[in-house]
Amino acid sequence: MKGTFPIEQFSALRTPFYYYDTTLLRDTLDTINREAGRYPNFCVHYAVKANANPKVLRIIKESGLGADCVSGGEVRAALKAGFPAHKVVYAGVGKSDWEIELGLDNDIFCFNVESVPELEVINQLAAARGKVAHVAFRINPNVGAHTHANITTGLAENKFGIAMEDMDRVIDMAHTLPHVKFVGLHFHIGSQILDMSDFVALCNRVNQLQEQLVQRHIIVEHINVGGGLGIDYQHPNRQPIPDFAEYFATYHKHLKLYPGQTLHFELGRAVVGQCGTLVTRVLYVKQGSHKQFAIVDAGMTDLIRPALYQAYHKIENITSEAPAEAYDVVGPICESSDVFGKAIDLNRCQRGDLLALRSAGAYGEIMASGYNCRELPIGYLSEELK
């Protein structure tokens, strides 16, 4: 079944563009709040890296979620959208001085620290401002995830986090620094995870590390398990909202929290992935020697995931009801990797047809580039096109 789109309004817009179904977005946010709200010590932050469209950010802010940022630019975007600073978490393996200073000046909730040198710099910069920075240590749990190698982050070989064997030493060091306050532990094992056993494995590792700290009479205030929950790219209509009930229940069942602790989540793709669609127009249908191509005006500059990760996005011809034919759907960029899908069955295409690339709300518009001197795509909310 195809998605439902305002075709008449689409036809008047310059393509390619992003379209965000705000009804679905708000329903998703309501589901998150309802399911996480079953556990009073659960706190959810939205991972801004998934989609920083200002209009989308404002809707997410209105739902009450916090913000998880991985750059100074994202911190600025979150604050501009109205996220309160005390709900802003700043992670990232390479924070520059100005980015740290931005967080300090706005008294954000916490820095997720990834190395000893970073901790030392935060202490120095906080001292210069007469402040105390709250820090959590991102620990690399050496837990794998059933996902693409490029978006696995929790293995010892990855660049992220502090090695488990260094955790005690770094915590001890933090207690000697007058301008940082150690408040938590942070973990993140990857993205687009659909197998709950991966999260169970993370829970087991966190439990192990917590027991190690309790033996030293250390109970941290906050545990942050990152995000990573995936979406159904194959069937966006069948499951437009991920199974947040199972996700939060998995952590409630398997992760041992101590009295007074809060558990933080950083969900991105699961929040916005399904509400977004890239709409593109067919420029030409070309018959090759062995296949036919639907050449569209969107390219890897507008949606890079298929070229970067060999990612799948369901593609629909939303202006044709003709019998289906097989096409390679390709863009105009001068790269052989500028392909959205091969041997895709679509209702017969002709010049001017509109194609919808579904499940593109996460890591779509935010990753767009100006390569080939192309203009960035515009993002429209469904409520703007009524």
Image (cartoon, helix red, strand yellow):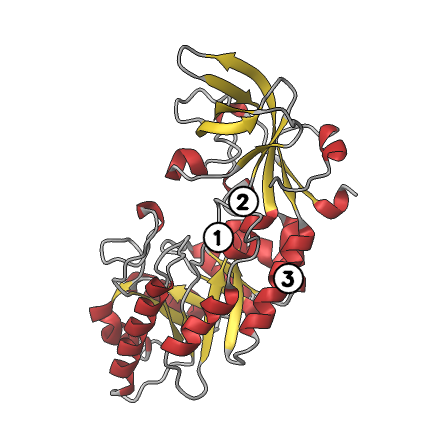
| 360 displayed left or right of 251 | right
Q: Residue at x 50, y 51 (%)?
A: 49
Within 10 Å of disc 1 (Cα), the crowding (few <14, some 14-19, many 20+) is: many
Q: Tag 3: residue type?
A: Lys
Mark 2, residue position: 359
Can residue 83 be seen in this snapshot? no
From what the image shows, is residue 314 above or below residue 262? above
Q: Secondary structure at mark 1?
A: loop
Q: Which mark is residue 231?
A: 1
Residue 368 percent coordinates (x, y): 52, 37
- Rendered image quadrant of residue 83: bottom right
Q: Residue furthest right?
A: 386
From what the image shows, is residue 19 above or below residue 43? above
Q: Secondary structure at mark 2?
A: loop
Residue 322 percent coordinates (x, y): 63, 24
Q: Relative to the observer, which residue lies in front, 355 or 59?
A: 355
Within 10 Å of disc 3 (Cα), the crowding (few <14, some 14-19, many 20+) is: many
- Rendered image quadrant of residue 180: bottom left
Q: Relative to the observer, which residue lies in front, 77 or 297?
A: 297
| 172 displayed left or right of 250 | left
Report how far apart the C-alphas of labels 2 and 1 lie in the structure. Answer: 8 Å
Q: Quadrant where the C terminus lies?
A: top right
Mark 3, residue position: 61
Report how far apart the C-alphas of labels 2 and 3 lie in the structure. Answer: 21 Å
Q: Which mark is residue 263?
A: none
Q: Residue furthest front?
A: 323
Q: Relative to the observer, which residue lies in front, 208 or 99?
A: 208
Within 10 Å of disc 2 (Cα), the crowding (few <14, some 14-19, many 20+) is: many
Q: Secondary structure at mark 3?
A: helix
